[in-house]
Amino acid sequence: MTTSFGAANASAAISKDPKLQIGKSFNGLNSLFLSQRAKPVKPDTAVEQKRSKVEIFKEHSNFIRYPLNEELLTDAPNINEAATQLIKFHGSYQQYNRDERGARSYSFMLRTKNPCGKVSNNLYLTMDDLADEFGIETLRLTTRQTFQLHGVLKKDLKTVMSAIIKSMGSTLGACGDLNRNVLAPAAPFHRKDYLFAQETAENIAALLTPQSGFYYDMWVDGEKFMSAEPPEVTKARNDNSHGTNFPDSAEPIYGTQFLPRKFKIAVTVPTDNSVDVFTNDIGVVVVSDADGEPQGFNLYIGGGMGRTHRLESTFPRLAEPLGYVPKEDILYAVKAILVTQRENGRRDDRKYSRMKYLLSSWGIEKFRTVAEEYYGKKFEPCHELPEWEFKSYLGWHEQGDGGLFCGLHVDSGRIKGIMKKTLREIIEKYNLNVRITPNQNIILCDVRQAWKRPITTALAQGGLLQPSFVDPLNVTAMACPALPLCPLAISEAERGIPDILKRVRAVFDKVGLKYNESVVIRITGCPNGCARPYMAELGLVGDGPNSYQIWLGGTPNQTSLARTFKEKVKIQDLEKVLEPLFYHWKRKRLSKESFGDFTNRMGNEKLVEVVDKWEGIPLTVSRYNLKHFADKETYEAMEALARLQDKTAHGLAMEIIRDYVASNQNGIKKH
């Protein structure tokens, strides 16, 4: 074992600063500073490795306690820089309202941790209450199957955190340099593979949960509110037969330094890519035999979305195949991969600290070899799998146990107003558990057949539409919160996406695309990629005030990485780019070719030429759409009328025709 800080330096630091001795609920005072390393031991070097400021904060924190514990007791509305980094491990970010000028109005965002997106009835009702009493009266569903609660004041943090914990919820590790929420398909199917995937996700989440007690010390005065974990999880965590653990440490897997950066894991079953499996540090896919009995897992590693504008050495990346492991080995294999990153990921520059950069530097073969040392076995070759599909699970479905579930679309995951009130009433009245999907939607679980009709009626009255009434563009669209609260945002996302989707629909109408056609659109306010825009068919990434970088080339099943197409496109100029792209897709696509596949086949060079030379839809017969208009004059009159109603001529004509047909369906002509 080596130390990067050193026992002598540790003793000196403690003697100089008695505050560092606060809260000694850990094994051994020296472990406060030991930057421990498990074997295989790296060779010592004469030059101490440079480390980022956050690494120093972690090292001096007494396992993520100090100085956060002191900062929370001050009267100031905010906390200092070190505490701001540490509170992330507790599941919170400090924010301020960037729309306001003058003095900053500080508040905190809390993010829950819900493996598989599972939310009990009690926890949902608690979160709903907390949003009203301590938040901004909204709940937000995230792309990692969790809640975000915005607007909590510092003085209320302990009250809110303790309420979540006492409702058997948690925010521990929802942010910070450790394993984040573990994804799994949210659908509550009673099928062996789905149940096994969800059980595995919960076990991985338990395995990689911090053990040093800092979370409970801070928010519930050390009282533990945890359900008993399966014995196989405890056994895997404590196993150190291949040098994965820090012996006698309060954090046997994480040590004092935790991970170099955040770490993301998703578990799923073949064909179901509702979890965007290839965007994760580890993608875990159940492999079953011919009888549907789970046998093991394919593992994919090295995915990640974040990047930095105009820095080509940062990039989004897809996970690639590592190998197959039998089902009884999954916890040991995941632990081995995580430890490989813990020991070798960069800690000097956080822009390059995700595992994707280690994998990109080493290559898959070297990574596999090192991970196998910690695993103690060889990874077998991955099993062949069928094609992936995106599954939204919207609408009513049979669970397979006699019950039903209902998937509900929530624009950008924001539950507010009448929708929030309606969901509360239904979930409370029928004592329903819910699940959050990775597409920012919500599922009502375990609904009895007799409840379907009254629930359907109540949902409609609350504005929660059946899938057939949701615009197909909205079904797959996602946006991050961005402005006004996210400190990283440089342009709008959640607040801007409703108008952008309407404008895309108008372009669809203008170029003749059908209503049931769609493209996957994702928007983020900065390049960090929280809404995974680099997997979208059309990704908009904020690169300045009211300005976006446009990415093209993702596919509907989220298996292809998009590429940069245009930089610095002003929001008011979107149609100048989208109209020629959609026009040519409509006219030159192959049979059933998605927009993403079309843009990949055409290539950037050709598409740039198409956009740059665009002079509008050609003034030909098709321009006047003579399927509906007898002559140019009629078209122009209809276009003028449509403009007054903020519609397209084609769209207005179709409305009139549909109304006319509907009024004559019973053979009664109405004038």
Image (spheres, helix red, strand yellow):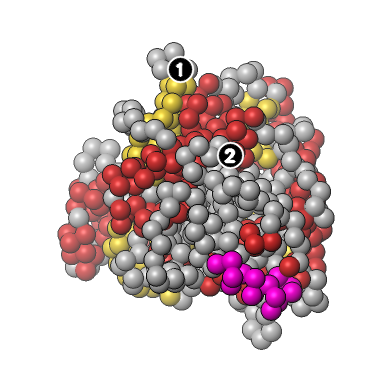
Residue at the (64%, 84%) spot, across then down? 101
CA gap, disc 2 and disc 1: 29 Å
Q: Is residue 596 above or below residue 447?
A: below
Look at the image and tell me whether residue 417 can be seen.
no
Q: Which mark is residue 292?
A: 1
Q: Secondary structure at mark 2?
A: helix
For disc 2, the neighbor class at 10 Å (few under 14, some 14 to 19, many from 20) is many
Describe residue 269's horizontal placement relative to residue 104 as left or right. Answer: left
What is the three-letter code of the residue carrying label 2?
Answer: Arg
Percent of width and height locating residue 386: 34, 28
Q: What label does residue 571 carry, if any?
A: none
Q: How many marks?
A: 2
Residue at the image point whose x is 50% and y is 37% from the top: 241
- Report the residue that reaches farthest toward the front: 8
Residue 490 x/y as whole percent: 48, 73
Residue 289, position as x, y percentages in the image: 41, 17
Residues in magenta, as a range = 6-20
Q: Residues within 10 Å of mark 1 (few under 14, many from 20)?
A: few
Q: Is residue 17 magenta?
A: yes
Closest to the camera, between mark 2 and mark 1, is: 2
Mark 2 or mark 1: name the one nearer the start of the chain. 2
Residue occupying image coordinates x 58% and y 61%: 34
Does 268 appear above or below 595? above
> In the rendered structure, does residue 59 fall within the stretch colored magenta?
no
User: What residue does disc 2 label?
Assistant: 237
The residue furthest top is 291
Residue type (three-letter) at the residue carrying disc 1: Gly
SS assignment for the magenta stretch, majority = helix
Residue 663 percent location from the top left of the image: 51, 37
